[in-house]
Image (cartoon, rainbow, N blue to C red):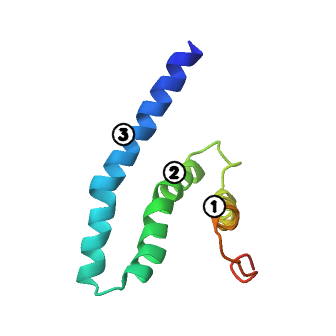
Amino acid sequence: MILLYVLILIFVFYLLAKICDEYFVSSLDIIAKKWKLSEDVAGATLMAVGSSAPEFFTALIAVMKVGSEQVGAGTIVGSAIFNILVIVGASAVVATSFLSWKPVI
């Protein structure tokens, strides 16, 4: 039974990657061209907003639901900090160049 769940999970991740590659990234490219943003700015802002929006709305709905006082805006902030540190940490492990202390601070 666990093997079935793992296979379903892998399949769902594959579908998510395909959908994001075909629709999400191309949509952000169109928005960036209309707003005349550079690729760096579009990647830093639009990608961040687009990847955090589902979590934000899920937490917002959970906060508004009666009886779920444990869920709050702190989950969003904590997740964002974790994502930033994991991305910087993974970059430091993979990168062949020196990583400055400034991104962590």
Kindly check if marks 3 and 2 are in contact, taking CB atoms under 8 A apart as contact. Answer: no
Q: Nearer the viewer, mark 3 or mark 2?
A: 3
Cα separation between marks 1 and 3: 22 Å
Left or right: residue 16 versus residue 87 is left
- Placement of 42 over or under 52, stated as above or below: below
Q: Identify the residue at image location x=56%, y=12%.
A: 1
Q: Which of 85 and 50 is in front in this view?
A: 85
- Secondary structure found at label 3: helix
* Type of the residue with mark 1: Asn
Few, some or many C-alpha atoms within 10 Å of disc 3 (few <14, some 14-19, many ≥20)? few
Q: N-terminal of the two: label 3 or label 2?
A: 3
Left or right: residue 27 versus residue 91 is left
* Type of the residue with mark 3: Leu
Left or right: residue 15 versus residue 94 is left
Cα separation between marks 2 and 1: 17 Å
Q: Identify the residue at image location x=70%, y=77%.
A: 99
Q: Identify the residue at image location x=66%, y=61%.
A: 90
Please state the horizontal and vertical placement of residue 9, each as a whole percent of the image: 49, 31
Q: N-terminal of the two: label 1 or label 3?
A: 3
* Type of the residue with mark 2: Thr
Few, some or many C-alpha atoms within 10 Å of disc 2 (few <14, some 14-19, many ≥20)? few
Q: Mark 2 points at which residue?
A: 58
Q: Nearer the viewer, residue 81 or 68?
A: 81
Q: Name the residue under label 3.
A: 15
Please state the horizontal and vertical placement of residue 36, each as a whole percent of the image: 28, 87
Kindly check if marks 1 and 3 are in contact, taking CB atoms under 8 A apart as contact. Answer: no
- Secondary structure found at label 2: helix
